[in-house]
Amino acid sequence: MLVLRTPDNELIVNHALMSAGFVPHHFIGTTELLDLPEDDDDDSGLSTQIDSLQADYLFTANGTPLTPLQLGQSLGSIAPGGVITAKIVSPVIVSSTTGSPNMATTGPMDSQTYTFRVDAPLVVRVNGFDMPEAASFPGTGFNGAEFEFLMNGVDTSINSTYTYSNKLGKTWFTVNGMGHVMLLSAPAPGDNVAIITITDSANAREPIDYRFTPKLWMRTTGINTTGATLDDARTTCNALGGGYRLAYYTEVSSSLPTELDSAYSPGRSATRMALWDNWGALTSAAYPSSGITPTANGLRGRMPLIV
């Protein structure tokens, strides 16, 4: 049996991640697992090698055979995060140091079919902003907040090739079959650790445990008038009880008020413990299940936040 190696001459490990920079035509076919043939006149010094001029490299990306042009392109440009199958079919040249003739070519032989994923960073998309995988996101939360995973680091086109499960069975959030997460309600004290297990249905990548722990939970006062005062917010907040208080400014944004842009969206961050940094501009369009209503300028719900 023939063997297919990576372009850097490493053995391919089935169901592993493969560098996005690898090019299919740069993979290396060898005969290292091929039993050396024997002939009737006991020729010695037998050796084998692939007939590289006749070799066929058979690659598919997400089930579709690669074209000759694609065989010369990087895997990351062809199918970022995608499932690749690969095998080589080739005649084998057999040679010996004694006897005559001392070289012959076999019929086509093939390797096993290898299956692997093209490496791609797991990205979290939140309100139009893409964040690299960060175990601390989100550190804040509110009813109706939502985000989604991009399993190829670019879009959701291969999300359905994974399954997503609520590992700890928490009831304060949901995750659907496309990797879309929604926060439903404030977790009970001590119950704010969540783990989403992401499993590759093609078994070409190890499962990922995505962990997040919201430590600040915000909600609106329900006041949606431009004339609402700080005292109005305090009154509403105190009436809620349950440990709620008015949020500190730094819990809402890490930017100074003068640094906020017109959309109330400061520098976005997965790790800073501030509402706008995590979630961006709070609009009914971005978070339709949150109960936030737009103001006349359409930027955000004019409702003081409390935590």
Image (spheres, rainbow, N blue to C red):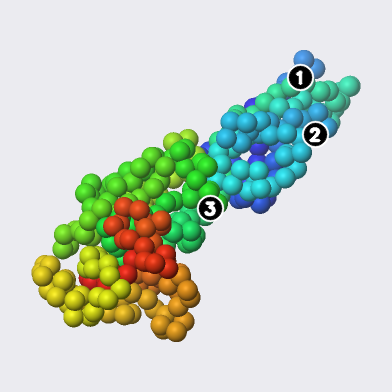
Mark nearer the viewer, 3 or 2 = 3
Image vertical order of residue 116 relative to residue 288, above or below: above
Residue 65, labelled with which disc? Answer: none
Residue 13 in view in this figure:
no
Q: Nearer the viewer, residue 83 or 34?
A: 83
Q: Position of residue 296 (x, y in %)?
A: 39, 67
Image vertical order of residue 305 relative to residue 48, above or below: below
Residue 107, labelled with which disc? Answer: 1
Mark nearer the viewer, 1 or 3 = 3
Q: Position of residue 297 (x, y in %)?
A: 42, 68
Count of numbered badges drawn on the protein: 3
Disc on the earlier residue, 1 or 3: 1
Give the quarter of the image for residue 287.
Answer: bottom left
Residue 153, labelled with which disc? Answer: 3
Disc on the earlier residue, 3 or 2: 2
Image vertical order of residue 254 relative to residue 58, above or below: below
Residue 239 in view in this figure:
yes
Determine the secondary structure under disc 1.
Answer: loop
Q: Is residue 244 left or right of residue 260?
A: left
* Residue that carries the numbered disc 2 in the rendered image: 52
Q: Nearer the viewer, residue 195 or 299?
A: 299
Residue depicted at x 43% and y 72%: 264
The crowding category of the residue bearing disc 1, from other C-alpha atoms within 10 Å (few below 14, some 14 to 19, many at least 20), is few
Q: Position of residue 205 (x, y in %)?
A: 47, 43
